[in-house]
Image: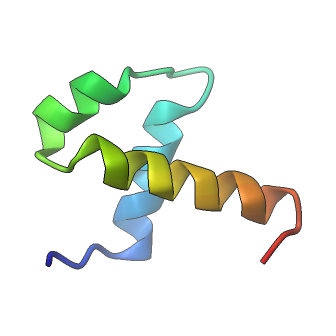
Amino acid sequence: MARYSEEFKESIIQKMMPPNNVAVSQLVRDTGISDVTLYTWQGKEEARERGQP
């Protein structure tokens, strides 16, 4: 299983969010990271923004 730095994850998440709105399918092609992993990262980021653990 690959390990990614927090900085790398943040950079990918930022691409998924406005104003960039890069499609997950495009990020899968660009990075080789699965869509499930990308959605998991995004969900954790959204929870953190809401103050949830």
Display coloring: rainbow
Would you say 33 lies left or right of 20 here? left
Q: Is residue 39 above or below residue 49?
A: above
11 vs 44, nearest the viewer = 44
Q: Residue at x 15, y 44 (%)?
A: 31
Q: In the orientation shown, which residue stands out farthest toward the front? A: 36
40 vs 9, nearest the viewer = 40
Q: Residue at x 30, y 41 (%)?
A: 35
Q: Position of residue 46 (x, y in %)?
A: 71, 51
Q: Is residue 6 above or below residue 50?
A: below
Q: Position of residue 21 (x, y in %)?
A: 50, 20
Q: Is residue 7 above or below residue 29?
A: below
Q: Position of residue 15 (x, y in %)?
A: 44, 35
Would you say 28 lies left or right of 44 here? left
Quarter of the image where the C terminus is located? bottom right
Quarter of the image where the N terminus is located? bottom left
